[in-house]
């Protein structure tokens, strides 16, 4: 049980104990409350352990990447001596720069398309009442719940019939819409103040102008957070690109696969290429993390 000491402004003696401290805290809210630090320290310790467990795989990836090829399977937590041989091998074996550029373009196109559909659809669902609205929204949600393996073969046959196999367009086309984005943005749209929309209508702005001049500028944190999630999901996609790009190594996910074969796996090169592929994601999150945190804070306040 935490020990709470309350120092009233008038200098009255503080009460200690479970129920006594709680009663004093409620009767004199203007006093200073001091919480015994054991509970706070335990919370920080748990968060530190969770953070270490989450960061350790990333650390081990770069540790293996900076080892020499002969020490790729070493269990030492410190890569010494440091070596760049794995990175040189990656650049000499595959066009990693072109692959990352292609992957960035693919992820950017998917993110922009999915965000555009999500903004328009969620705005319609949140603002207007029309026949079949709930049924249509449930169809959106249901399409998100359908496993990708169910739609994979029909999508593959369609891409093959229109001649987009072994092309990045074949990877992009079936994923231009995201039901998850519609579901997430609808919650923010419904929480948007109606007074602002009514005021924009009184100023003579239509629904289209109100969306882009009033709603979108006030939802930048939520849009930034969702954009990052969609970009990371598109960047990390492996199954569908590996199925469509059978004879092409245009994307970095497929390029990393080339270091794993029947003769053996070059783990040093795999980790080096994976480490390079993670850098754009790290940079994007570093520059936009303020918007992500702000989005979670505002969602909690709503």
Image (spheres, grey):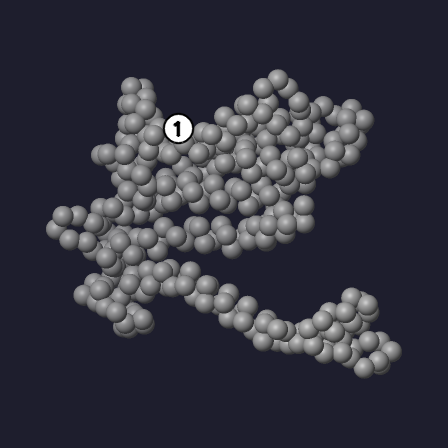
Q: Residue 112, image x and y in percent?
A: 50, 35
Quadrant of res 103: top left
**Number of numbered labels in the structure image:** 1
Q: Residue 123, image x and y in percent?
A: 62, 30
**What element does badge 1 sit on?**
helix
* Mark 1 burial class by Cα count in 10 Å: few <14, some 14-19, many 20+: some
Depth check, front residue: 78 or 15: 15
The extreme left residue here reads: 263
Depth check, front residue: 221 or 105: 221
When the figure is inspected, residue 177 is found, relative to residue 279, above or below; the finding is above
Q: Quadrant of the C terminus?
A: top right
Q: Residue at x 82, y 76 (%)?
A: 8
Quadrant of res 268: bottom left
Specify whether residue 131 is in view. yes
Q: Residue at x 79, y 31 (%)?
A: 199
Quadrant of res 34: bottom right
Q: Residue 117, image x and y in percent?
A: 53, 29
Q: Quadrant of the N terminus?
A: bottom right
The extreme right residue here reads: 10
The extreme front residue here reads: 19
Q: Residue at x 31, y 71 (%)?
A: 77
Q: Residue 17, image x and y in percent?
A: 69, 77
Depth check, front residue: 74 or 269: 74
Specify whether residue 159 is in view. no
Q: In the visual, does 289 lie left or right of 233? A: right
Q: Residue at x 55, y 53 (%)?
A: 289
- Say which residue label 1 marks: 174
Q: In the visual, does 232 lie left or right of 187? A: left
Q: In the visual, does 256 lie left or right of 216? A: left
Depth check, front residue: 200 or 8: 8
């Amino acid at each position: 049980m935490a020990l709470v000491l309350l120092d009233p402004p008038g200098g009255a003696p503080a009460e200690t104990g479970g129920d006594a401290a709680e009663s004093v805290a409620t009767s004199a809210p203007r006093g200073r409350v001091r919480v015994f630090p054991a509970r706070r320290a335990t919370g920080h310790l748990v968060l530190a352990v969770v953070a270490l467990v989450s960061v350790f795989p990333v650390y081990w990836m770069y540790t293996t990447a900076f080892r020499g090829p002969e020490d790729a399977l070493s269990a030492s937590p410190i890569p010494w001596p440091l070596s760049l041989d794995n990175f040189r091998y990656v650049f000499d074996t595959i066009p990693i720069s072109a692959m990352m550029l292609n992957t960035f373009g693919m992820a950017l196109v998917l993110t922009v398309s999915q965000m555009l559909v999500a903004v328009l659809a969620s705005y319609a669902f949140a603002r207007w009442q029309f026949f079949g609205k709930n049924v249509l929204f449930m169809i959106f949600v249901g399409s998100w719940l359908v496993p990708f393996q169910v739609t994979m073969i029909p999508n593959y046959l369609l891409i093959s019939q229109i001649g987009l196999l072994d092309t990045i367009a074949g990877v992009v086309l079936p994923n231009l819409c995201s039901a998850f984005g519609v579901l997430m943005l609808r919650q923010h749209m419904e929480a948007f103040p109606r007074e602002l929309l009514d005021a924009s209508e009184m100023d003579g702005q239509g629904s289209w102008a109100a969306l882009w001049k009033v709603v979108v500028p006030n939802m930048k944190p939520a849009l930034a957070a969702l954009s990052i999630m969609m970009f990371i999901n598109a960047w990390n996609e492996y199954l569908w690109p590996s199925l469509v790009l059978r004879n092409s190594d245009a994307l970095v996910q497929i390029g990393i696969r080339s270091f794993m074969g029947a003769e053996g796996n070059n783990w040093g090169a795999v980790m080096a290429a994976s480490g390079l592929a993670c850098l754009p994601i790290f940079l994007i999150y570093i520059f936009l993390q303020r918007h992500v945190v702000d989005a979670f804070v505002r969602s909690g306040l709503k």
